[in-house]
Image (cartoon, rainbow, N blue to C red):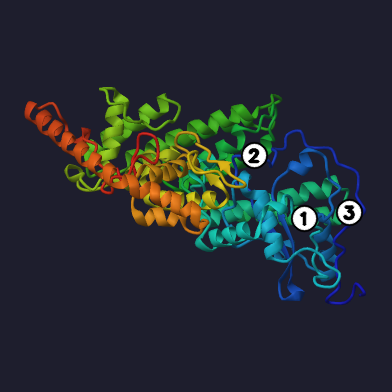
């Protein structure tokens, strides 16, 4: 079909590759396993916006120098530009709408492969002549029909970031989308330069990237606080590992931060600190500035803004306020860990007891369950485990779904009779999602939990396996309940004796579970 035709095809396997360009020594690498990764799609406006290519953001290929790709998004965009006579690439590239906030590095390969299949973007001479992906993505063979349906259901319900991903995912969706588009265009620009694309194309990409960057900066100014802007800027340089950063870029970023601090009405003294960092980063100075120096300078500003933000919080209960700051101080001193019950008089035990009682429905002396939660989330914003325990109900529902999935994938409790394809159930690190899954299945074989949850976890298993797990629970459930009744009676006596002697505080009592279920996480029960 001639190039002038409105439905001309683009070669899915471009062959010409230019020479690799020299890397900028001061450029910050895109790849960072603790940052979100995005799936994007390129579409054809002349074909009712049909998706013709699906890609992912990362610089693994560029880090390893593998620029000869079977289906290059860079070359595809260039050919579409000429074919459709588009003036801006932003009109043919977008993030997939199902993942506006991206995904952790551990899920990006799977998600790219899923969307290549879901969007039907692979070239086929007869069935999909406009497709421009050369294959269905890396490790596509691992996406079985069952797994495909699971991903589809996961996306339909709304993708949720795992708590233990190590990714700070606390910005508005619009900010995440703006940042994702910037990462997409940054990758395209770098690839175009490395592959020796024509200057007109590279310049057009750079112009679009400048507009995308302005979109991102504008969105951040509108939706983020000064503290968030400072923290995100500090994070950018924290792991860059550069001896000499681009000081002109850093100066621009600091000036934007100053504007945001002024707009938010923050203490002008803090902008005095920003001015000091600006002076040190002045491009005219003949001394380089490392990314580590940039990180520490901006990090100090972020911490001071956080302190100001916390000073403005209006608490309704002074005890909760005091204890919450105590929890934070202890966790910082102990590697950002969650305090757990030790059954002793330690500070860790006292703080763990406080959290358990504060979250319970019996926390009447505080004014109710999780009183001052909004304030507490501000104070504890850097602790993923805290967000996890206050969102415990959703977390436990997810653990039930994952437990069912793993059993159906042939993972089995160690006492379960062996069958073809048996795989040992993994234990998981303390505080991880996996340990909750492990303990959910452990609770079944020990007789804890609710029958409804048992049936959800064994749903869809072959009948012999389902019967085995159901019998394990039924045979031990009565004895487990009786033991829990005795334990509760003993606790009640201990509380009464302690109250009589004046030795017990109202926050040192750990209430038992309403459903009598064992801990799903070390030191923490389902409904503490």
Quarter occupied by residue 80: bottom right
Where does the image place residue 402, in percent across and percent down from the top left? Answer: 50, 50
Circle 1 sits on which residue?
Answer: 205
Q: Upstream in the sequence, badge 1 or badge 2?
A: 2
Where does the image place residue 239, in percent across and percent down from the top left? Answer: 62, 32
> 353 left or right of 59?
left
Label 3, label 2: how many angstroms apart (C-alpha)? Answer: 29 Å
Residue 295: mark in rendering: none
Where does the image place residue 520, in percent across and percent down from the top left? Answer: 39, 41
Residue under the image location 85 percent in, 63 percent down: 79
- In depth, the one of 400 and 161 nearer the eye is 400
Regarding mark 1 in the picture, which secondary structure is present there?
helix
Label 1, label 2: how many angstroms apart (C-alpha)? Answer: 23 Å
Circle 3 sits on which residue?
Answer: 198
Residue 32: mark in rendering: 2
Q: Which class describes the residues within 10 Å of circle 2: few (<14), some (14-19), or many (20+)?
A: some
Where does the image place residue 60, in percent across and percent down from the top left? Answer: 74, 42
- Image quadrant in which the C terminus is located: top left
Whether residue 272 is visible here, answered yes or no, is: no
């Amino acid at each position: 079909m001639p190039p002038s035709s409105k439905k001309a095809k683009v070669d899915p396997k471009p062959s010409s590759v230019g020479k690799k360009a020299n890397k900028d020594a001061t450029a910050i690498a895109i790849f960072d396993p603790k940052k979100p990764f995005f799936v994007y799609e390129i579409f054809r406006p002349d074909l009712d916006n049909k998706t013709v290519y699906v890609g992912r953001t990362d610089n693994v290929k560029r880090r390893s120098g593998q620029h000869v790709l079977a289906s290059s998004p860079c070359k595809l965009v260039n050919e579409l530009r000429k074919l459709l006579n588009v003036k801006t690439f932003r009109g043919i590239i977008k993030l997939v709408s199902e993942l506006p906030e991206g995904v952790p590095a551990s899920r990006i390969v799977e998600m790219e492969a899923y969307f290549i299949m879901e969007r039907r973007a692979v070239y086929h001479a007869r069935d999909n002549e406009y497709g421009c992906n050369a294959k269905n993505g890396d490790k596509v063979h691992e996406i079985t029909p069952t797994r495909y349906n699971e991903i589809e259901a996961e996306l339909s319900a709304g993708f949720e970031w795992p708590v233990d991903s190590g990714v700070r995912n606390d910005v508005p969706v619009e900010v995440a989308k703006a940042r994702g588009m910037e990462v997409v265009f940054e990758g395209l620009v770098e690839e175009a330069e490395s592959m020796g694309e024509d200057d007109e194309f590279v310049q057009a990409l750079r112009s679009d990237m400048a507009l995308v960057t302005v979109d991102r900066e504008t969105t951040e100014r509108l939706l983020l606080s000064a503290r968030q802007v400072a923290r995100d800027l500090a994070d950018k340089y924290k792991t860059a590992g550069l001896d000499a950063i681009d000081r002109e870029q850093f100066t621009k970023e600091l000036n934007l931060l100053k504007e945001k601090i002024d707009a938010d009405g923050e203490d002008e003294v803090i902008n005095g600190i920003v001015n000091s960092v600006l002076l040190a980063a002045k491009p005219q100075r003949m001394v380089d500035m490392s990314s580590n120096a940039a990180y520490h300078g901006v990090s100090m500003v972020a911490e001071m803004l956080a302190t100001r933000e916390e000073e403005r919080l209006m608490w309704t209960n002074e005890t909760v306020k005091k204890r919450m700051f105590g929890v934070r101080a202890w966790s910082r001193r102990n590697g950002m860990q969650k305090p757990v019950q030790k059954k002793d008089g330690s500070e860790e035990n006292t703080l763990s007891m406080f959290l358990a009682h504060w979250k319970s429905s019996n926390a009447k002396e505080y004014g109710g369950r999780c009183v001052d939660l909004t304030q507490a989330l501000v104070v504890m914003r850097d602790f993923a485990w805290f967000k996890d325990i206050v969102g415990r109900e959703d977390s436990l529902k997810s653990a039930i779904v994952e437990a069912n999935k793993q059993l159906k994938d042939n993972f089995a409790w160690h006492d379960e009779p062996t069958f073809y394809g048996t795989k040992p159930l993994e234990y998981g690190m303390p505080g991880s999602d996996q340990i909750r899954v492990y303990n959910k299945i452990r609770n079944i074989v020990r007789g804890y939990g609710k029958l409804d949850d048992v049936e959800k976890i064994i749903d869809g298993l072959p009948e012999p396996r389902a019967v085995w797990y159901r019998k394990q629970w039924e045979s031990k459930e009565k004895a487990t309940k009786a033991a829990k009744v005795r334990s509760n009676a003993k606790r009640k006596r201990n509380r009464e004796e302690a109250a009589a002697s004046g030795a017990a505080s109202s926050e040192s009592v750990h209430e038992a579970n309403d459903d009598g279920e064992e801990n799903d996480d070390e030191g923490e029960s389902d409904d503490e």
